[in-house]
Every structure is written in structure tokens, then in C-alpha cells.
Image (spheres, rainbow, N blue to C red):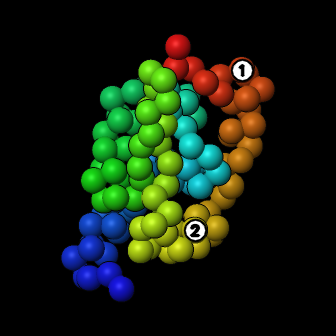
Amino acid sequence: MVTFSQAEVFLKAVGEETRLKIIAYLILDSFCVCELVELLQMSQPSVSQHLRKLKRADIILEEKRGKWVFYYLNKHHNLYPFLLHLVSTLPSLQDDIGSLVVKGKRILCE
């Protein structure tokens, strides 16, 4: 059970188009900032700011792999099932990831 305050923080964090897209991508796989920059066609500082808001709400976690930091969804968040349902009602972004692979830009962090 979540409190009203926790629900408010969560809903404010996910209640923005770019952050919803980030969540939709992270349901499919983990990504580093540079890959999300390419997928979202936004600047690195903008993407980092959105990631920071999602991280503050404990919706995403990060893992350092070598010199890169990869982001992934926090599957232990109380509202994770809600996130899955919410994203299932949105258009799929799977093709975007496929085109990233085809372009050879799946990992840009070099």
C-alpha cells in the first residue's frame, strides 16, 4: 500500500511525455544516457534531468558498467505493476530500439 504522498510523488514523476517514453524504453531494456539521447532526440542535459526526477521518485535505478551508467526500472517499487499497465496502453517503442541497433548506435558511450 502506498500513501497519498508517495502516490503524488510517483504521479508527478511519470506525468510528463518524455519521462513516460523513458519508462517505456526501460521496460524493454536498460539504457545509458547517450542511448536515450539518441532515442529521444534531446540533449544530454535534458535527458539527465528527466532521469534525475525518475530516480528521485525511486522509479528507476542505475548501475555502473565500466565507465558507463545504465538505467533500469525499479521492479521493487510498489507501483511497478501500475507502470507496466500504463505503458501497455501506450504505443510501442520497440521499433525505435530496433532502428537504433540497425544504425549501429545501440551503445554510443565511447
- Can residue 12 be seen at all in this image of the molecule? yes
First in sequence, mark 2 or 1: give its number. Answer: 2
Residue beneath the point at 65% across and 27% down: 106
Identify the disc placed on residue 84: 2
96 left or right of 47?
A: right
Tell me the SS state at disc 2.
helix
Left or right: 50 as drawn, with respect to 17: left
Residue 36 x/y as whole percent: 52, 35
Residue at position x 64%, y 67% in the image: 88
SS under mark 1: loop
Position in image of residue 35 (x %, y %): 55, 30
Task: Name the residue furthest bottom.
Answer: 1
Q: CA distance from mark 2 to mark 1?
A: 28 Å
Q: Is residue 90 above or below residue 53?
A: below
Three-letter amino acid code at disc 1?
Gly
Q: Residue at x 48, y 37 (%)?
A: 70
Q: Which mark is residue 104?
A: 1
**Which of the 4 image quadrants contains residue 31?**
top right
Is residue 16 among the parts visible in the rendering? no
Vertical side of 64 occupied by 51: above or below: below
Q: Residues within 10 Å of mark 1 (few under 14, many from 20)?
A: few
Comparing 15 with 109, the one in front is: 109
| Image location (x, y in percent) of residue 45 | 33, 29
Percent from the top left, x then y, of residue 40? 52, 36
Q: Which mark is residue 59?
A: none
Identify which amino acid the numbered label 2 is placed on. Leu
Instruction: Give the quarter of the image for residue 2.
Output: bottom left
Name the image quarter holding the N terminus: bottom left
Q: Name the residue rendered at 59%, 55% in the picture.
A: 27
Q: Within 10 Å of the Cα at label 2, are there few (<14), some (14-19), or many (20+) other Cα atoms? A: some
